[in-house]
Amino acid sequence: MPAEQDALFPGKQFISTVLEALETKTRMTGAIAHRYLMRAAMAGMIVAVFYIVNYAIVGIFSGLHVGETSLAGIGKMLGALAFGPALVFIYYTKSELLTSNMMVVVIGYYYKRISAWRTLRVLFMCLAGNFMGGLVFAVMYHFSSLVEGPTGEQALHSVEAKLGYLSSASGIGDLFVRAILCNFMINLAMLLIYNGFIREDWSKIFSMIMAVFVFAFLGFEHSVANTVLFTVIGLTHGIDVLPALGNVAVALLGNFVGGGLLIGGYYAYANDDSRWLGRQLHKDEVQAGE
């Protein structure tokens, strides 16, 4: 029966690994909450660094031409690739990123390992930490010239586009879908890492870089990245706060659907063998009675 069970529910190790990670997160957000906030803040700092690298590369190539052909598209591709390692650094520094935690807490809630209150606590503390980390680097950027010139122009253009989604119902819908797809990709990479089938570090690194590349290149919406970007631009160039908060709110909902439900909820249910085991036990009892 174990071999048949493994074939029918191949994601059991993934679920087990996620539940172990959840146990650590719930303990940290209780007994040593300040250390959990520090780990979440580091994720915000990492995003702040790599996001500016992305805009710096895009800014450089936007002004380059070969004949009459602009190299802006190449810059967009290289910028997205440069942003990809952000998730790698977050994973290997054991930092805490809100969007991947959405998947973790949904699986934990499905298997009754965490209450609704604890779920909200983990997510809120992670978001707060991510914001604080981004704020630290935003303050440093304010006293530097790093977000000026072509880099600043590209970042401002991106902010304008992101805030523009809030101008119409169709724009909000577009933002919501982009947020769903963004965290679907992020947690698809985490699924590959946690499921036990990929063991080599380079395979894990490639998976994470490609997942982030897809969302960055196609312009998907990541709530934490947007929060960090808005904080940086707010302190360096100024920003309209209410639309920025609206963007983050919609992105949070979309990210939760994409990573929490479409990955977390989907695979939690797909690998739940409790009903199958109950039917097998009933079947064995019937056969034994005959």
Image (cartoon, rainbow, N blue to C red):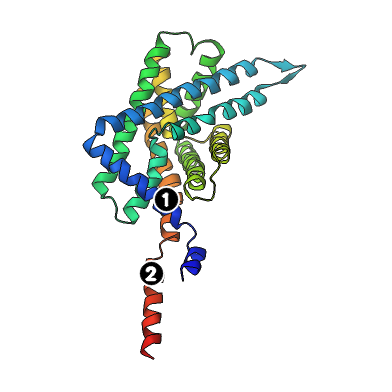
| Tag 2 secondary structure | helix
Q: Would residue 11 be visible to someone looking at this image?
A: yes
Label 1: few (<14), some (14–19) or many (≥20) C-alpha neighbours in 10 Å: many
Q: Residue at x 59, y 29 (%)?
A: 81
Using the rendered image of the protein, determine whether residue 121 is visible from the camera's viewpoint: no
Horizontal and vertical percent position of residue 57: 59, 20
Residue 157 percent across, percent down from the top left: 52, 21
Identify whether 153 is placed above or below 275. Answer: above
The spot of residue 161 in percent (x, y) is 50, 27
In the image, is 24 to the left or to the right of 8?
left
Query: Residue 264 got which mark?
Result: 1
The residue lying at 44 percent from left, 25 percent from top is: 46
Residue that numbered label 2 is attached to: 275
Q: Determine the secondary structure under disc 1.
A: helix
Task: State whether residue 47 is above or below residue 220.
Answer: above
Label of residue 73 in the image: none
